[in-house]
Image (spheres, rainbow, N blue to C red):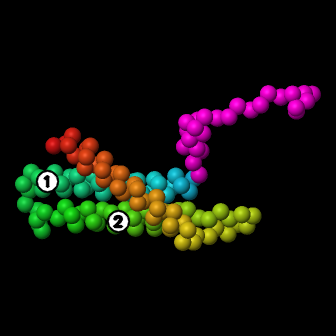
Amino acid sequence: MTDPTTRPPVPRRGWVEVRWRQFRHAPRPVVRAVLASLIVAAVLAAAYVVYDIAIDRGSRLPGGDLRLAALTVYVAAVLVVGTVVTYLVVPLPSGSGTARRRTSWSAALGFFAAVPIAYLVMVVATQIVRPLLS
């Protein structure tokens, strides 16, 4: 048996290695919260890009140019759906009991995950995808 005092010191992991490990082993509630918001944002951003292209090509749609209203609906829908879906899918840890409870913390997790996702998906859709389709 080896003496514990003679073992070599454990090397410290670098910053990139630590972040990569955190990315690979993210907690399931966080992954669910992010995916719920990401899916809704991607679908609604695709619809917005289609609408934006139709307006730019001169299509006469009912109501005229409602891009600002569509953008407002997009943000509100991503925030609401991200909050509600996360509230429904992410229960609090149950500890030793079998009861699974949900509180406003689950909804808060969904809301705060949805805010940057709504922004980033719309930036990618309008600044990268939209010019490629024009």
CA neighbours of label 1 inside 10 A, class few (<14), some (14 to 19), many (20+): some
Q: Which residue is mark 2?
A: 77
- The residue under the point 26% across, 43% down is 128
Q: Residues within 10 Å of mark 2 (few under 14, many from 20)?
A: some
The verdict on residue 6 being magenta is yes
Pointer 2 or 1: first along the chain: 1
The picture quadrant where one finds residue 66 is bottom left
Q: Nearer the viewer, residue 24 or 60?
A: 24
Q: Is residue 92 magenta?
A: no
In the rendered picture of this protein, how many numbered marks are placed on residues? 2
Q: Residue furthest bottom?
A: 104
**Residue drawn where x is 52% and y is 52% of the image:** 31
| Residue 17, quarter of picture | top right
Left or right of 130? Residue 12 is: right
The residue to which callout 1 is attached is: 54
User: What are the residue bounds of the magenta stretch?
Assistant: 1-27
Quarter of the image for the N terminus: give it: top right
What residue type is disc 1 on?
Ala
Q: Position of residue 34 (x, y in %)?
A: 47, 54
Rendered view: 94 above or below 116: below
Tell me residue 122's x, y (percent): 30, 53
Q: Is residue 24 visible?
A: no
Q: CA distance from mark 2 to mark 1?
A: 22 Å
Kind of residue at disc 2 = Ala
Left or right of residue 3: residue 45: left
Residue name at image x 40 percent, y 55 percent: 117
